[in-house]
Image (cartoon, grey):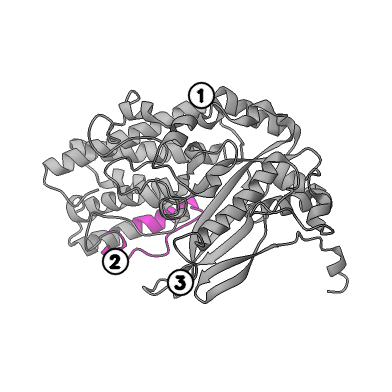
């Protein structure tokens, strides 16, 4: 360790006195702020900075050119347009609550973990995702001027604002000048990384995080459940219209209309220049693998075991399904597999429709085997069976596209339009399947 320690150049943590409820009182909280780590990596770990943060100039210019030409909805009036894009590094902020005690139990405890990364990072997630701060649930003060969460986000946003400007701040997060003689006072106003600066471009997380932490619209609302647009459950702006000319598509927020909205989020992250709800990134894993796929795949398995297959009882039908799945896994060398599927409770629930349990990676690779299983037993003369077949085929096609272009920073426009078209068809097939199921009295499906 004596040989290793002198070679470690780690960014200093930022220490702040914050109010807590448990234990009560003021306590020191440490944060590894983005601007500190950004500058430290640039100064001390140049190669890692290029690989994991800034990329090369061509990649940066390609990124911003794509944001301009598509265009990205946040580009419209973003102040980055007036700056030198050669030094602009697009950043993502990710938040999630992770269990830290009593995992799987009703009394489990969770930790909110907030991290950031560069959208130009070329290496693994563990090398490009940088932790900023965490907060254990039920330890902070929830409301009022001393609310712990609000103070943490205020400090985090203050650091990201300095990173946006590209210079060390002249005042602390409370607006006070740094004391003379301190390191912070000496470097105040100087460049963070010789012209490089960070632009928060994506806010990532699951729906609970968006609602509870970022204070965005609740996804369970019948009226305006989406953070990006004004779609609703019913009426002219119903989100169940999946057509390309659906009225809700024209109701997307614009930066100025969102900031003028009285019910917008008051999370300090949106005080950073150029920030609005249009930076919200509804990630594919939660939306699809741990979202629509779980419901669709569970419904297909339920249809097979309870209605289509003729092996005997639902339990015997499921056993036949599992034999087919294991053989498919073996022959096709499926990278990530379910270990077992011996009980109907893998996809049936006490309340609500079917929903297949599993990890995101297991669901990611389950589409191919489920399509093969379904086409083995289905009846192509039945409308509902045709709808399920089309749905599964489109789903598999989308996943094959993602696998084929894995690692690419951007997809070609033709590929993107093709992917969007297949996603829209999946949505339409799901809606049609639901209507057909309800007409047949199969209310447990979907």
Given residues 111 and 83, the one toward you in this image is: 83
Start-end of magenta stretch: 323-347
Q: CA distance from mark 1 to mark 2?
A: 43 Å
Proximity of marks 1 and 2: CB atoms separated by less than 8 Å: no
Does 343 lie within the magenta span? yes
Residue 343 numbered mark, or none: 2
Residue drawn at x 50%, y 53% is 333
Q: Secondary structure at mark 1?
A: helix
Residue 142 % position (x, y): 45, 63
Instruction: Name which residue lies at 34% across and 36% down.
Output: 426
Disc number lying in front (1 or 3): 3
Residue 389: where, in percent of width, then height?
29, 39
| Percent x, y of residue 337 | 45, 58
Residue 122 at least partly seen: no
Residue 373: x and y in percent read 32, 49
Position of 168 compared to 110: left or right? Answer: right
Q: Which residue is mark 1?
A: 414
Crowdedness of circle 2 by 10 Å Cα count: few (<14), some, many (20+)? few
Of helix, strand and loop, which one carries label 3? strand
Q: Earlier in the sequence, mark 2 or mark 3?
A: 3
Asked if residue 414 lies left or right of residue 54, the reply is: left
Q: CA distance from mark 2 to mark 3?
A: 29 Å
Q: Is residue 162 above or below residue 337?
A: above
Q: Residues within 10 Å of mark 3 (few under 14, many from 20)?
A: some
Which quadrant, please, contains the N terminus?
A: bottom right
Q: What is the C-alpha distance between the residues marked 1 and 3?
A: 46 Å
Circle 3 is placed at which residue position? 109
Secondary structure of residue under mark 2: loop
Q: Is residue 65 left or right of residue 252?
A: right
């Amino acid at each position: 360790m004596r040989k290793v320690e002198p070679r470690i150049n780690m960014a200093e943590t930022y220490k702040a006195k914050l109010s807590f409820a448990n234990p009560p009182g003021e306590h020191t909280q440490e944060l590894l702020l983005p601007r500190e780590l950004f500058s430290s990596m640039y100064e001390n770990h140049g190669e890692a900075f290029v690989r994991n943060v800034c990329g090369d100039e061509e990649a940066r210019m390609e990124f911003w050119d794509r944001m301009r030409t598509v265009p990205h909805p946040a580009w419209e009036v973003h102040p980055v347009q007036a700056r030198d894009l050669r030094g602009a590094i697009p950043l993502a902020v990710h938040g999630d609550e992770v269990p830290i005690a009593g995992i799987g139990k009703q009394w489990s405890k969770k930790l909110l973990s907030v991290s950031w990364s560069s959208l130009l990072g070329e290496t693994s997630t563990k090398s490009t995702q940088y932790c900023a701060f965490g907060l254990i649930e039920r330890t902070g003060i929830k409301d009022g001027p001393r609310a712990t969460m609000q103070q943490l986000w205020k400090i985090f946003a203050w650091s990201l604002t300095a990173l946006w400007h590209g210079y060390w701040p002249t005042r602390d997060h409370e607006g006070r000048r740094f004391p003379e003689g301190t390191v912070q006072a000496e470097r105040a106003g100087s460049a963070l990384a010789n012209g490089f600066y960070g632009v928060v471009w994506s806010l990532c997380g699951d729906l609970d995080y968006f609602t509870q932490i970022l204070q965005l619209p609740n996804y369970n609302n019948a009226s305006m459940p989406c953070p990006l647009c004004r779609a609703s459950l019913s009426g002219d702006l119903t989100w169940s219209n999946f057509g390309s000319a659906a009225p809700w598509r024209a109701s997307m927020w614009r930066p100025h209309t969102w900031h003028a909205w009285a019910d917008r989020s008051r999370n300090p992250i949106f005080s950073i220049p150029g920030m609005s709800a249009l930076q919200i990134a509804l990630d594919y894993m939660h939306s699809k693998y741990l979202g629509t796929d779980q419901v669709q795949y569970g419904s297909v398995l339920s249809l097979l075991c309870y209605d289509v297959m003729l092996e005997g009882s639902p339990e015997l039908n499921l056993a036949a399904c599992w034999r087919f799945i294991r053989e498919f896994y073996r022959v096709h060398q499926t990278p990530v597999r379910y270990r077992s599927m011996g009980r109907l409770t893998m996809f049936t629930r006490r309340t609500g429709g079917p929903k297949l349990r599993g990890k995101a990676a297991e669901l990611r690779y389950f589409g191919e085997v489920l399509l093969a299983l379904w086409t083995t037993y289905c009846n192509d003369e039945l409308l509902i069976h045709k709808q399920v077949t089309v749905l599964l085929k489109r789903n598999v096609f989308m996943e094959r596209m993602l696998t084929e272009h894995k690692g690419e920073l951007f997809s070609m426009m033709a590929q993107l339009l093709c992917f969007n078209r297949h996603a829209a068809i999946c949505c339409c097939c799901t809606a049609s399947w639901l209507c057909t199921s309800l007409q047949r009295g199969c209310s447990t499906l979907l």
